[in-house]
């Protein structure tokens, strides 16, 4: 979402290169990370996050602007809409699960 919003914000910036996330590389890096045991009582319980900078790539545009800008605003807005819908669905799912647990604990 952050990369998409940065691209949208810089749609009129001369020579700005549209960026994207290489999801396949990020998933491969995440699967190769060592897992931290939940039983540990150390600050490293929270596993290391994927460093986004290592998986950011420049997006190849269909049409480059005359000023060298590679942001295709319609594409970025479409992707932002899709990702925000997915995010909202995930948040709603989590809220429903937590609400169900709360109701069960209250005996409702």
Image: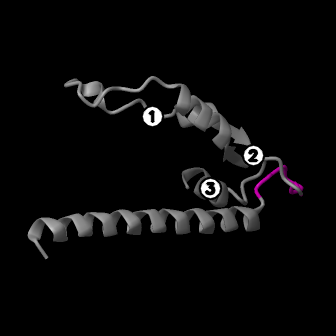
Q: Nearer the viewer, residue 67 or 91?
A: 91
Which residue, given by chain and number where applicable, does mark 3 sit on? Answer: 4
- Of mark 3 and mark 1, the one earlier in the sequence is 3
* Magenta run includes residue 64: yes
Q: Which residues are magenta?
A: 63-71
The circle on residue 17 is 2
Left or right of 20 in this view: 48: left
Measuring from the top left, give residue 71's x and y in whole percent. Answer: 76, 56
44 within the magenta span: no
Residue 32 location in percent, x, y? 54, 25
Whole-percent x, y for residue 65 in the image: 86, 57
Quick one: 39 or 87, which is closer to the camera? 39
Secondary structure found at label 1: loop
Secondary structure at badge 3 equals helix
User: In the depicted view, which residue is nearer to us: 24 or 20?
Assistant: 24
Judging by the rendered image, the residue that carries numbered circle 1 is 49
Question: Is 89 displayed left or right of 102 in the figure?
Answer: right
Tell me how far mark 3 sits from mark 1, CA to CA: 20 Å
Disc on res. 36: none
Mark closer to the observer (2, 3)? 3
């Amino acid at each position: 979402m952050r990369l998409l919003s940065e691209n949208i914000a810089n749609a009129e910036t001369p020579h700005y290169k549209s960026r994207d996330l290489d999801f396949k590389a990020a998933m491969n890096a995440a699967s190769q990370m060592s897992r931290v045991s939940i039983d540990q009582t150390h600050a490293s319980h929270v596993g290391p996050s994927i460093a986004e900078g290592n998986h950011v790539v420049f997006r190849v545009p269909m049409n480059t602007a005359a000023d060298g800008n590679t942001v295709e605003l319609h594409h970025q807005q479409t992707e932002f809409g899709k990702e925000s819908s997915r995010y909202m669905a995930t948040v709603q799912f989590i809220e429903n699960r937590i609400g169900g647990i709360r109701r069960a604990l209250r005996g409702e």
